[in-house]
Image: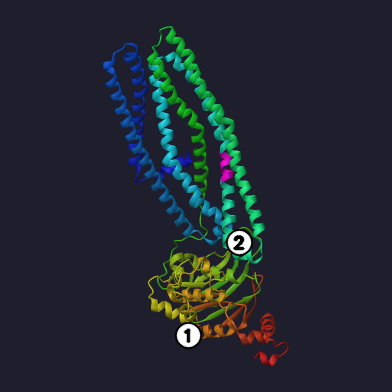
Amino acid sequence: MASLKWIWYYTKGKRGFVWLSVFFIVIASMLSMVYPLVGGKVIDIVIDQGKMGWLLPLLGIMIVTTFLRTILRYTYQIMFERVGQNALFQIREDLYKKLQSLDFAFFNNTRVGDIMARMTGDTDAIRHFVSWVVYNILENTFLFLFAIVVMASIDWKLTLALVIITPIIAILTIQMSKRAQPIFYEIRESFSRLNSMVEENISGNRVVKAFAREDYEIEKFKEHNEDFKQRNMDSADVSKKYLPVLDSLAGTLVIITLIYGGFLVIQDQMTLGDLVAFNGFLWMLNGPMRMSGWLINDAQRFVASSFKIRDMLETETKIPIRSEKEAPELKGFVEFQHVSFHFEDDPNTDVLSDISLTAAPGQTIAILGETGSGKSTLVNLICRFYDPTEGIILLDGVDARKWHVRELRDHIATVMQDIFLFSDTIEGNIAFGAPEATIEDVRRMARIADADHFIETMPESYDTIVGERGVGLSGGQKQRISLARALLKDPSILILDDTTSAVDMETEVKIQEELSQITQDKTTFIIAHRISSVKDADEILILDHGKIVERGTHVSLLEKKGYYYDIYQKQLGLEGNDNGAQ
């Protein structure tokens, strides 16, 4: 019932079509009763009694009612399709909006293939249910009820003999439903895993080819594909056990009709025309009985798919979108007060521990540390991709959790370590965060990021379409386009996560010179592994296992001869040369 209540909500705006369609189904079902009745009259009046004058009027009635029924069926089928497509549109839109509101924690714990399965396969199962299953259930139900009533009016004893079998069919149908439901959930999960595996393979196809692992990937796909096939075979096995029995019971009705009905005709208790009409109604009963199994299967698919979709729609984000404070003008003052953080799935391991720092507009804070030391997590807290589990982060003196998330992020630009470019023009990628920017603005930021010269050499210059995720561009080119994208946003807070790791030293120097000019009024956070990228920062933080173990300027840290000093010596090849360090 929960699934039906949920899908009913998505028929809003089209419920007039639903009720009109139900009315048309009732009328069409009533018209369906005419054909067997008139057929029986043709036998009794025209053939038995030889009244040929009745033939054309009776045939005319059959033709007209059949034509009207056909028109009505076509109309309500179209109406249900429109209702289904409208529901599908609204559900997909709600799912996509929900995806935009969910935080990093959701995407960290959810397979891409699972999300895609909900957006495609599950939503189509919903459409199929609304557009086809619902009207078939209604149509078969009314046909069954009307046929029983008319059959009882012809001969209630024969009707009763047939109806006795109906509870058996109902019991078998319910049993089939119970057996099928968990299998459809398994099918849904198997399809999700298969989807994820294919998506992962496509995204990582270059790595697969570089390591010549095509055969391994094919075998892995075979395993997932075999699992998906087996789940569907399990579903087919359930159908094979029940559907033949249902068909046999439906066939039994015909046998009962012929034997008992024939006896009544011989005894002159029923006319031959009534028996023919009765047999016609019997075939109307056969349809709903034979289809009940298939409709139950489709209904179970709908329940399984609606559960997965509702599960996503009802997922609570850990980072509320709307908060107490709007952010029309964020100046860029950042303060961490004893901040600690751990991921929800590992509460016993702090990724960050007791972090305190302050940064003001015009200042640059650099963060160094080994892989996994918590550098990226620290800056992610500024953007509120996560909230701290302990301590507080102040932005312009206000708790970050009180800022409106989207407006807050409007004032922050991040060049992430894992760079993502859209399948769009280079201009479109750079202007992604500032869609109102002119081409001159785009070119200016590209020059600052030292990207303009290689963009101009491309086939369509700034109108060149880059491949998905930037396929076709080098790592350094993607980094520079991503940097231009962040700078064009003109943020109050600029976060550069390993931004120049893939460019040569000469290019890095050019970029740093340009950045020093453009970031004079911005609060800048730099994550890097190269000393050359951080040496001019106002403060350098050294992280180790989520804790700040060293902090200071380039000169003061060299004087301490700790971790920073060791890295400096290794990178410049100046081991033991203390004087050169200065």
Q: Are marks 1 and 2 in contact (CB under 8 Å)?
A: no
504, above or below 266, in the image: below
540, above or below 62, in the image: below
Residue at horizontal 48 percent and vertical 32 percent from the top: 291
Q: Would you say the magenta stretch is mainly helix, strand or loop?
A: helix
Q: Can residue 533 be seen at all in this image of the molecule?
A: yes
Q: What mark, if any, has residue 517 been given in the picture?
A: 1
Which image quadrant for residue 105?
Answer: bottom right
Residue at horizontal 53 percent and vertical 43 percent from the top: 304
User: Taking 390 as reference, is 139 left or right?
Assistant: left
In the structure shown, which secondary structural element does the residue marked by tag 1 occupy? helix
In the structure shown, which secondary structural element does the residue marked by tag 2 occupy? loop
Is 185 magenta? The answer is yes
Residue 229: x and y in percent read: 60, 44
Is 50 magenta? The answer is no
Q: What mark, if any, has residue 343 been given in the picture?
A: 2
- Magenta stretch bounds: 181-187
Which image quadrant for residue 544?
Answer: bottom right
Question: Gap between marks 1 and 2, in whole Å?
Answer: 37 Å
Lower position in the chain sequence, tag 1 or tag 2? 2
Q: Which of marks 1 and 2 is in front?
A: 1
Q: Can residue 338 be seen at all in this image of the molecule?
A: no
Name, please, the residue furthest toward the bottom. 579
Residue closest to the eye, 300 or 314:
300
Residue 3: x and y in percent read: 47, 42
Residue 515: x and y in percent read: 50, 82
Q: How crowded is mark 2: few (under 14 residues within 10 Å), some or many (20 or more)?
A: some
Amino acid type assigned to the residue bearing label 2 in the image:
Phe
